[in-house]
Amino acid sequence: MRQLLPVPAADVDPAAAHAAAARPAPEGRPWVLANMVASADGATAVEGRSEGLGGPADKAVFSALRSVADVILVAAGTARAESYGPPRTPADRRAEREARGQAPYPRLALVTRSLDLDPTSAMFTEATAPPVVFTVTSAPTARRQALDGLAEIVDVGDDGVDLAAALGWLADRGVATVLCEGGPSLNGQLLAAGLVDELDLTTSPLLVGGDSARAAHGPDGEPLDVELAHLWEADGVLFARYVRA
Ligand SMILES: NC(=O)c1ccc[n+]([C@@H]2O[C@H](COP(=O)([O-])OP(=O)(O)OC[C@H]3O[C@@H](n4cnc5c(N)ncnc54)[C@H](OP(=O)(O)O)[C@@H]3O)[C@@H](O)[C@H]2O)c1
């Protein structure tokens, strides 16, 4: 078995490394990579937010992953907890994206049953492209109307968003790479449905306890074999890239 020692993150350009990584879209859907930060004991939130878990090196990896995505997929619980805004891509990364044939900014896509999303939030009012909101036919009409003109609302399911159908909808529109930023319940459903190709997991040298969910939490699925594609380290923080074997 090959030995993979952590590479000092200072020796790596995360944006270049992630841009160079192969992410071939499977038949009928985009490549799906999930990015999460956790404590050494598996907590994904401190007092309900992920903020306390990452550090400067994690921000660089987070930004590098956003730079390669056509779409950033996030569940409504995380968008609310983390006060999501529009993706903000620095100018040099925008130029690289355009050179690769991508839009300058990744587009945000949300998953929600309730449509409980604040229409005055920056993720709608400051968006360069209106977010896609994947929801269900039974979503409340008044909330649907409140988002009119601010988002592209797509019904994919009656009681729960059919995630395979949502990914298929994106693929039909040329989306090749989807970055899922959680939360754990969305990751868990994607995993159970066999819709995850890559996990980029940052592990911080913290022990947190608490009752936050693991990086993926939800229905049982077939365990997925993954390979460790890289492992970087900065100040005790580990950055692992696992790819479907
Ligand atoms: N450490 C990290 O990297 C990280 C990353 C992300 C999030 N987090 C943390 O994780 C927590 C939130 O995660 P969570 O697992 O509780 O919630 P979540 O997955 O972010 O959101 C759950 C919500 O998403 C919507 N949803 C999910 N699947 C759906 C489906 N199939 N159909 C329709 N709607 C669906 C529903 O929204 P509606 O209620 O609107 O119907 C549901 O209530 C927060 O504390 C956040 O800070 C940590």
Image (cartoon, rainbow, N blue to C red):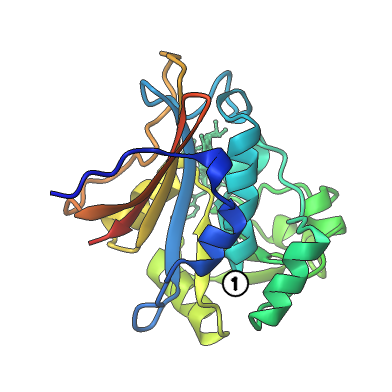
Asked if residue 137 is positioned above or below residue 62 in the image, the reply reads: below
Q: Position of residue 99 (x, y in %)?
A: 70, 80
Quarter residue 41 falls in: top left
Residue at the front extreme of this rendering: 11
Residue at the left extreme of this rendering: 1
Residue found 37% across the figure and 32% down from its top: 214
Horizontal side, residue 216 vs residue 182: left or right: left
Horizontal side, residue 145 vs residue 228: left or right: right
Residue found 61% across the figure and 57% down from its top: 15
- Nearer-the-camera pick, 76 or 39: 39
10 Å crowding of disc 1: few (<14), some (14-19), many (20+): some
- Nearer-the-camera pick, 244 or 135: 244
Q: Does residue 231 appear in this view?
A: yes
Name which residue type carries label 1. Val
Q: Where is residue 197 in the image (x, y as percent from the top left)?
A: 35, 62
Residue found 58% across the figure and 65% down from its top: 69
Provide the residue designation for mark 1: 154
Q: Where is residue 127 in the image (x, y as percent from the top left)?
A: 81, 62
Asked if residue 173 is positioned above or below residue 236 in the image, the reply reads: below
Residue found 43% across the figure and 24% down from its top: 43
Asked if residue 151 is positioned above or below residue 224 in the image, the reply reads: below
Horizontal side, residue 183 vs residue 153: left or right: left
- Nearer-the-camera pick, 51 or 58: 58
